[in-house]
């Protein structure tokens, strides 16, 4: 945010804030640890607004659930912004001191009247207004989100819309305030920190805009760093289809099952000249590979660090040896480098980390292994060894006069999902996750759990009744791209017109055969959250017929 | 809240019962019908507002019980939806309280007391006779298989003491329906019970205490707390005011809160519920707590076997309870008070409810009491048939809508009580002393009784005395005098033992009845006044029977939260049964040693007074009465 890709706040702040807008996140199920911090906040009086098309278990803890139409987040956010401005609750002092572009933003949200907001989002106008005013009036308030915001073709604009709200009200750069994307894995944040992003060098130094960093790091490593960003995953897949990209090295990712529009992905992967997959298990992607490199599980079989959603870098320690011929991931990379003509030697995890501290000194210079251990992890940035780490980011925005560049408002506009329901495909399918499973199930499907009931098509009681579908009956779900069958599960948390599936059981139900190959041009994230489908009953003859195959 | 609703549907009756209490559901997210556009896009159920409703769980379950006679899974589910409580949690509450049934039960139930007070008056024979004509008490199989219950079906059950020892043997009748009926019966015969069990029975009034109205058998000049009982119309506010009612509140408002607490402190008034804590100190502590709001709880969950004094006060002088609470609230800064009254006291409940209504109508409760800007109101909460809820922290849990499990102390109620706030919790009898203290001055009360135990005390005389009832006497009166007040023993009978303080108290021997009834004398004699129980047993009583009943009582009423009590009360009862049946393990001395070991563990390690006193009566029977000693050295 404002240049640094990480949540602004600490977990502790969630426990002490007054208002939380939990936007596009079912954290109760998908971020249970973070949600425990939120529960402490709730116990302390935090008022919770949950913005989600479904009335999820998270929404069941909310003081208010705002069940917007899938993909109408910007309409909601801009409507709230307009209400805040018209109620005279914009923090004018903060805006003047810390931000840029307010006038253009103010003008841009003017068409987002309450009437428009209600029409575009479905959320009653009085509820939108109450939420806006409560958020604005709160002493401490934060916005937290997950994939409900980012798995849209307007992913970046959605995030910018939420940041606008925080800038408008001065709910950033202070204790208990902020904007927090909740990370879906223990180390999504750490991957970004290290520079595993197409346009960033280690420590979020921008590869295109930061010439000084390019030169400094390039000189140290004896290479010339190109001033152009790489491809994101979606772009890579398209490049593979066009045969511009013919070799791929995949580390710990399962795109053959996790990505949108699976037919397209599988074609792209099988069309490669060379596919190398480094994995702990033989995933569907690994099955397609020319070479599989069995790796140690980094969480228990290797040394290193992870960074959590509050930017806290924590040590990971090896507790068991990897099985069989599986090798430490660092060892694999170092050996590959040797064979590719760049000898890194045989670095330990700590040596790699210290190299990172040297090339990203402002970010991690003060985070030695010894300090990480002594302090129980440190929240970045931490430039030197006397620095305690930052509990929250962007405090500089409150300094008068402001230090550094202004935080910009962004003009963003409502743009509904690419695919709208129509007569042929009348239902909106949105996808997500469930408590007991994790992504494509590589790590979770092997466990016994009373909550594992396999994949289902979750459907509202109204649609189930209209279509004559009984609870548990196997149905066919079709989109313009593919079809799958799954048992129906009548779910009263869904309203008519919306169905829900997960991608947890890709071997049984390949949900991503249905999802759309639309993505955000700015971030490459795919629009998993919205596509149009139809649901049909399966005749007994069809069922019997399918049984023979 | 994470709610996993049960699939079963509530019946129309169950819904109506809950809606009558809570109003109609505002949205499909709290149990209303689906389909509104608004519900599809917003909900305000599940947050702070919903969690604030949790305290209505017990009243909602009681509403279903009172309407239908039992709570089905669907009914429970509907209550959960309305109050946003997870069904598993609500199930834990519903199954905690004896007066709630989660298995099908006929609409009319006669609860026949088989506890010690009624045992002294033929309860065992009564129950045997009822069993013979009406069949065994369980009207349904344990697996709930018999679910087809006719509307006019009736059944009977055993119940522990229902506070009717002055009219033993006694019974409590409940009839579920749109107009639920309840009544206490006593003394009752098998024929009476069979009338209620008959299909043709049609109750007349909603609530009725059968039998003649009770007037204290003492001259009025001996009475302070009982002075209005039987003499002043309990349902007339005018009559109450004409007998000095509300003069004390006027005086309190004129004195100011600090002066009220000072008078109460000067009087040395001590709690009459059993723990004898100085009331002035309790009030002072709460009054000084910065945390707000403060709450007042009147503990009317009078469930100690043999105790019925608070019932008499509430039935016959309800305005005194209301006025006393108002003074206490004024002194300690409480804007809200609760009367937690045991579920088996329908008449007392009705009288208090009416008195509260009258008081509100005459600005003696509400926003501006007596036009003096004092704001205070009272809500009645009915118990669910759980002895433990009389414990001063379990009562909070119960009001908050939870299982009545006592809390660890500290923190003490005066600091962290009801809803986590500073709370005054006082027994009914304690409170009704307060108007007298204000009218006469604290010193006047301090002059009655002894230096350490001041004022008069209500004693519940029951068992084998000629005139069981509540008797008022100054502290320092002897047990012998108290027995004489109640007419003494029946002709030709000799005294065998006296149970002081109820099931949680101790037996004393006939040669000990010159004991003075004060806190200091009883403590020195290693016994207790407890809640004022004096249960007299003559030579017709088989004491072994009484000891077993007391042991069964504690086993049944243990809340099960802490191990010493949950396990200890069972082990105690088992050992006593082995002794009775002469199936001794390792001989009598070994069994008695085991009882002592278990008893000491309960006393030392239980969270609350229930476990701590569960061995007291048994121990006194063993050590004081020498009940299990082999006569003349021979095996019993």
Image: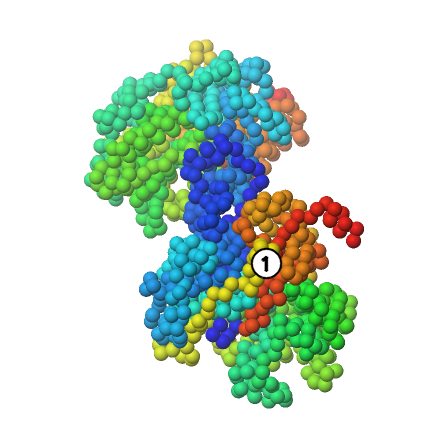
Left or right of A300 on screen, residue B15: left
Q: Position of residue A365 (x, y in %)?
A: 54, 79
* Residue at 61% over, 46% down: A467
* Residue at 61% over, 76% down: A231
Q: Quadrant of residue B524?
A: top left
Q: Position of residue A485 (x, y in %)?
A: 68, 53
From what the image shows, is residue B145 above or below residue A63? above
Dot 1: element: strand
Closer to us: A507 or A358: A507
Left or right of B156 on screen, residue A277: right
Q: Residue furthest front?
A: A423
From what the image shows, is residue A229 above or below residue A528? below
* Residue at 28% over, 34% down: B360
Provide the chain ID for the residue under circle 1: A
- How many marks the image carries: the answer is 1
Q: Residue furthest top?
A: B492
Q: Is residue B515 visible?
A: no
* Quadrant into which the C terminus of chain B falls: top right
Q: Position of residue A258 (x, y in %)?
A: 65, 64
* Residue at 55% over, 46% down: A462
Residue located beneath label 1 in the image: A532
Left or right of B157 on screen, residue A394: left
Closer to us: B468 or B452: B468
Q: Position of residue A1 (x, y in %)?
A: 49, 72
Q: Is residue A84 visible?
A: yes
């Amino acid at each position: 945010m404002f240049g640094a890709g990480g949540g602004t706040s600490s977990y502790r702040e969630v426990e002490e804030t007054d208002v939380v807008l939990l936007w596009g996140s079912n954290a109760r199920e998908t971020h249970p640890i973070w949600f425990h911090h939120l529960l402490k906040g709730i116990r302390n009086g935090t008022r919770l607004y949950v913005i989600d098309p479904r009335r999820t278990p998270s929404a069941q803890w909310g003081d208010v659930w705002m069940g917007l139409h899938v993909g109408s987040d910007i309409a909601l956010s801009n409507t709230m912004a307009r209400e805040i401005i018209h109620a005279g609750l914009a923090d004018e002092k903060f805006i003047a001191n810390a931000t840029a572009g307010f006038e253009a933003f103010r003008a841009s949200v003017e068409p987002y009247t309450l009437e428009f907001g209600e029409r575009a989002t479905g959320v009653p106008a009085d509820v939108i207004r109450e939420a806006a005013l409560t958020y604005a009036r709160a002493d401490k308030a934060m916005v937290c989100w997950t994939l409900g915001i980012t798995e849209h073709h307007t992913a970046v604009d959605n995030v910018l819309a939420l940041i606008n709200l925080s800038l408008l009200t001065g709910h950033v750069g202070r204790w208990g305030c902020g904007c927090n994307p909740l990370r879906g894995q223990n180390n999504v944040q750490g991957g970004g920190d290290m520079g595993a992003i197409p346009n960033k060098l280690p420590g979020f130094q921008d590869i295109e805009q930061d010439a000084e960093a390019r030169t400094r790091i390039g000189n140290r490593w004896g290479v010339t760093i190109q001033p152009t960003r790489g491809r994101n995953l979606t772009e890579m897949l398209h490049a593979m289809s066009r045969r511009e990209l013919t070799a791929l090295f995949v580390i710990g990712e399962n795109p053959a099952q996790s990505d949108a529009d699976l037919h397209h992905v599988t074609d792209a992967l099988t069309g490669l000249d060379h596919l190398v997959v480094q994995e702990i298990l033989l995933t569907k992607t690994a099955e397609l590979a020319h070479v599989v490199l069995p790796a140690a599980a980094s969480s228990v079989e290797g040394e290193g660090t992870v960074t959590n959603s509050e930017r806290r870098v924590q040590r990971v320690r090896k507790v068991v040896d990897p099985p069989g011929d599986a090798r430490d991931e660092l060892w694999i990379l170092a050996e590959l480098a040797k064979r590719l003509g760049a000898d890194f030697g045989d670095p330990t995890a700590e040596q790699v980390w210290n190299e990172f501290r040297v090339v990203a000194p402002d970010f991690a210079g003060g985070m030695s292994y010894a300090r990480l251990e002594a302090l129980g992890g440190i929240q970045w940035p931490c430039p030197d060894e006397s620095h305690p780490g930052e509990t929250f980011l962007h405090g500089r925005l409150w300094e008068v006069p402001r230090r550094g560049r202004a935080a910009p408002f962004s003009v963003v506009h409502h743009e509904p999902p690419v695919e709208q329901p129509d007569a042929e495909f009348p239902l909106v399918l949105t996808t997500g996750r469930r408590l007991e499973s994790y992504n494509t199930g590589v790590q979770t499907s092997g466990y016994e759990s009373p909550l594992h009931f396999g994949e289902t098509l979750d459907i509202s009681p109204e649609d189930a009744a209209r279509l004559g579908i009984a609870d548990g009956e196997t149905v066919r779900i079709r989109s313009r791209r593919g079809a799958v069958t799954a048992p129906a599960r009548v779910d009263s948390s869904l309203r008519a017109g919306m169905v829900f599936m997960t991608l947890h059981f890709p071997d049984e139900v390949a949900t991503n055969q249905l999802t759309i190959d639309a993505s955000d041009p700015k971030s490459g994230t795919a629009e998993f959250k919205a596509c149009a489908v139809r649901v049909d009953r399966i005749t007994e003859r069809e069922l019997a017929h399918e049984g023979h195959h | 809240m994470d709610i996993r609703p049960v699939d079963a549907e509530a019946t129309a009756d169950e819904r109506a019962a809950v809606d009558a209490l809570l109003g109609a559901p505002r949205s499909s997210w709290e149990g209303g019908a689906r389909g509104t556009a608004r519900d599809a896009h917003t909900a305000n159920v599940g947050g702070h507002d919903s969690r604030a409703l949790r305290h209505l769980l017990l009243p909602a379950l009681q509403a279903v019980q009172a309407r239908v006679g039992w709570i089905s899974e669907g009914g429970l589910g509907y209550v959960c939806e309305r109050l946003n409580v997870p069904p598993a949690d609500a199930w834990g509450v519903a199954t905690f309280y004896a007066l709630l049934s989660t298995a099908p039960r006929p609409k009319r139930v006669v609860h026949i007391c088989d506890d010690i007070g009624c045992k002294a008056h033929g309860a065992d024979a009564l129950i045997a006779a009822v069993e013979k004509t009406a069949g065994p008490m369980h009207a349904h199989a344990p697996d709930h298989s018999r679910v087809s219950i006719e509307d006019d079906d009736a059944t009977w059950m055993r119940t522990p003491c229902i506070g009717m020892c002055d009219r033993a043997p006694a019974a409590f009748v409940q009839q579920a329906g749109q107009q639920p009926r309840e009544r206490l019966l006593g003394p009752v015969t098998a024929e009476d019970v069979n009338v209620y069990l008959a299909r043709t029975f049609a109750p007349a009034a909603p609530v009725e205490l059968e039998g003649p109205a009770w007037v204290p058998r003492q001259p009025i000049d001996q009475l302070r707390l009982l002075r209005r009982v039987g003499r002043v119309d309990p349902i007339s506010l005018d009559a109450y005011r004409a007998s000095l009612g509300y003069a004390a509140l006027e005086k309190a408002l004129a004195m100011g809160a600090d002066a009220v607490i000072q008078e109460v402190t000067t009087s040395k008034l001590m709690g009459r519920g059993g723990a004898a804590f100085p009331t002035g100190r309790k009030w002072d502590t709460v009054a000084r707590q910065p945390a707000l709001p403060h709450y007042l709880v009147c503990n009317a969950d009078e469930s100690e076997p043999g105790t019925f004094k608070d019932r008499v006060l509430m039935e016959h002088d309800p305005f005194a309870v209301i006025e006393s609470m108002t003074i206490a609230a004024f002194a300690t800064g409480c804007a809200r008070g609760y009367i937690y009254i045991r579920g088996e006291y329908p008449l007392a409940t009705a009288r208090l409810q009416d008195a509260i209504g009258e008081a509100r109508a005459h600005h003696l409760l509400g926003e501006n009491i007596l036009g003096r800007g004092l704001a205070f109101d009272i809500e009645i909460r009915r118990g669910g048939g759980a002895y433990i809820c009389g414990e001063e922290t379990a009562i909070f849990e119960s009001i908050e809508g939870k299982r009545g499990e006592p809390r660890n102390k500290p923190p003490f109620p005066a600091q962290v009580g009801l809803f986590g706030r500073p709370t005054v919790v006082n027994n009914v009898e304690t409170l009704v002393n307060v108007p007298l203290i204000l009218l006469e001055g604290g010193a006047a009360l301090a002059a009655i009784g002894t230096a350490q135990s001041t004022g008069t005390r209500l004693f519940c005389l029951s068992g084998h005395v000629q005139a069981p009832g509540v008797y008022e006497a100054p502290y320092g009166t002897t047990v012998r005098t108290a027995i004489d007040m109640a007419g003494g023993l029946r002709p030709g009978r000799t005294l065998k033992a006296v149970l002081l303080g109820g099931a949680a108290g101790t037996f004393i021997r006939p040669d000990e009845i010159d004991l003075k009834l004060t806190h200091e004398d009883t403590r020195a004699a290693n016994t207790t006044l407890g809640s004022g129980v004096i249960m007299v047993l003559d030579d017709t009583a088989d004491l072994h029977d009484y000891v077993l009943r007391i042991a069964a009582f504690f086993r049944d009423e243990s809340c099960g939260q802490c191990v010493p009590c949950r396990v200890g009360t069972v082990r105690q009862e088992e050992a006593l049964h082995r002794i009775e049946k002469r199936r001794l393990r390792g001989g009598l001395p070994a069994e008695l040693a085991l009882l002592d070991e278990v008893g000491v563990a309960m006393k030392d390690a239980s969270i609350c007074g229930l476990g701590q006193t569960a061995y007291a009566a048994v121990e006194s029977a063993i050590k004081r009465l020498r009940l299990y000693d082999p006569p003349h050295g021979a095996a019993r």
